[in-house]
Image (cartoon, grey):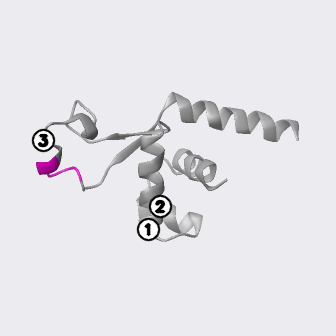
Amino acid sequence: MMIRKLLQLAVAMGTARSSELAQALGVGPEIAQQMLEVLEREGYLHSDVQGCSIPCQRCPLHAACLFCNGPRIWVLTEKSEKLLAKNNRESCVN
């Protein structure tokens, strides 16, 4: 599943541009960015903007933010860590 692979790459690469993740997945940068945004909406990733204390979606200044469309730091959530741990256990059994 490409979603799991993206999460695994995010963990393995530490920091990477979405273009680097796209290349590793064999997709275009726009697709990789869309996947990251879906993972955020589904609760697998959290976008962290340096200097902000609340998530972008809840920020009243979201529409005017200078950082909103800039580089983001993606952080794995507990939900994604559980998914990856489950996959690791299943691959060890097989």
Q: Nearer the viewer, mark 2 or mark 3?
A: 3
Q: CA distance from mark 3 to mark 1?
A: 27 Å
Residue 83, image x, y percentages: 63, 35
Three-letter residue code for mark 2: Ala
Which of the labelled discs sits on residue 61, or is there none?
3
Which of the labelled discs sits on residue 32, or is there none?
2
- Mark 3 or 1 closer to N-term? 1
- Looking at the rendering, in which quadrant would you find the C terminus? top right
In the image, 36 versus 49, the foreground residue is: 36
> Please, which residue is most extreme toward the right here?
94
Q: Residues within 10 Å of mark 1 (few under 14, many from 20)?
A: some
In the image, 26 versus 30, the foreground residue is: 30
- For disc 1, the marked residue is 29
Residue 10 vertical position relative to residue 82 in the rendered view, above or below: below
Residue 17, quarter of the rendered image: bottom left
- Mark 2 or 3 closer to N-term? 2
Q: Is residue 17 left or right of residue 23?
A: left
Q: Which residues are magenta?
A: 63-68
Q: Residues within 10 Å of mark 2 (few under 14, many from 20)?
A: many
Q: Are marks 2 and 3 in contact (CB under 8 Å)?
A: no
